[in-house]
Image (cartoon, rainbow, N blue to C red):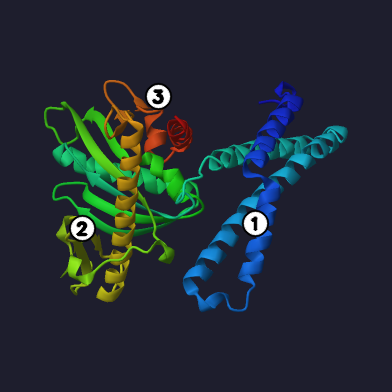
Amino acid sequence: MRVAERDYSTEFESLEKSLAGIESVLDVKKLEQQVHELEQEAGAPDLWNDPENAQKVTSALSRTQSTLNKVKALRGRLVDLPVMLELAESESDAKALDDFNKEIDSLTKAIGDLEVQTLLSGEYDHRDALVTIRSEAGGVDAADWAEMVSRMFLRYCERHSLSVNVLETSYAEEAGIKSTTFKVSGPYVYGTLSVEQGTHRLVRISPFDSQNRRHTSFAGVEVVPVVEQSDHIEIDEKDIRVDVYRSSGPGGQGVNTTDSAVRITHIPTGIVVSCQNERSQIQNRATAMAVLQSKLLEKRNQEERAKIDALRGDTSGSWGNQIRSYVLHPYQMVKDHRTDYETGNTQAVLDGDLDGFIEAGIKWRRLARAR
């Protein structure tokens, strides 16, 4: 876009309106007061006499400071924009004008991202997330599709500089995966990725069908928040069964020569978790227990939400768990069935470009909760 084509005054007004709305929703003065109070708590000499409370205080302080600093930084950048434009135009400097355009585009995106983040007000939205992807109906195509979905999310995390730790992967015999679980770390990761939970449906010409017929396959995505010590998810040792086995890679190849992989079954609920990424059995057991705690926490939350929905007479979710369709044949389209957001650029989506779907999902969820 050439400089002459841009209406900067309108862009300034739009950015000012968006940022002012964010500042109002977040209540900057209240955030400043919260930071002040949390700093006093964090500075108490006896803070670490209670490690559980200390962790809660320091986490809250870090999170609140980060939000406050982000809002103030955006306000500072917005205030500087008219000055930058005036200098660039007065000097008739093409490079300065180009730098200004890059800055206003960058600021527009940053304010848009924070605007979406302000919608993430759930109790666990600020936490890291555990993502589990499983192949569902569709045989070998479903296993291949589950691996494609896993790659899609890993590429999304890479695009957003989110830390990923793959905890366990179970490979299918012919192609693809049966399941995989990975931890994603970053600000508001759970709140962001939780809108991706559900069944993802693929329609394509099967590469595994010698007659080149069209197949439909399904992959399930589960997203749960990572537990903190303060969540009090007690697990009785009598309620779990621990199995150890040898880690394996694609094609059944062993990736470890000892039985260090751990599988834990929670007998009362039937929940099974595995971990094979660490070298020692002790480390894998500890990681698997943390994953089990997260899944039990999510189960408890789902039960609580179900009770509330029953009282409300909630009739949402008529599509069941199927949230999105990815059609590669006879036409190209990815469509979310909850928000109606869609795109014809299927390859970009499969390469991790999920921003539009996630933003629409977060807004849809907020409206659904408000009903």
- State the SS at label 1: helix
Residue 171 disc label: none
The reply to whether callout 1 and callout 2 are in contact (CB within 8 Å) is no
Q: What residue type is disc 2 on?
A: Val
Residue 266 lies in what quarter of the image?
bottom left
User: Which corner quadrant holds the C terminus?
Assistant: top left
Q: In the rendering, which numbered label is found on residue 34? A: 1
Could you say where residue 244 lies in the image, as x and y percent from the top left? Answer: 17, 70
Q: Earlier in the sequence, mark 3 or mark 2?
A: 2
Q: Quick one: quadrant of the N terminus? A: top right
- Tell me the SS state at disc 3: loop
Checking the image for residue 340, the label placed there is 3
Question: Residue visible at 43% across and 49% down?
Answer: 190
| Residue that carries the numbered disc 2 in the rendered image | 272
Task: Locate residue 217: give its quadrant.
Answer: top left
- Tell me which numbered mark, 1 or 3, is placed earlier along the sequence: 1
Query: Residue 299 location, x and y as percent?
Result: 29, 51
**Whole-number angstrom distance, CA of label 1 to CA of label 3:** 39 Å
| Neighbour tally class for label 3: few under 14, some 14-19, many 20 plus, Cα within 10 Å | few
Distance in Å between CA atoms under marks 3 and 2: 34 Å
Residue drawn at point x = 27 percent, y = 20 percent: 330
Q: Residues within 10 Å of mark 1 (few under 14, many from 20)?
A: some
Q: How dense is the environment of label 2, judged by Cα within 10 Å: few (below 14), some, or many (20 and up)?
A: some
The residue drawn where x is 62% and y is 40% is: 25
Element under disc 2? strand
On the picture, is 225 further left or further right than 80?
A: left
In the depicted structure, whether residue 284 falls above or below residue 369: below
Label 3 close to label 2 by CB (< 8 Å): no
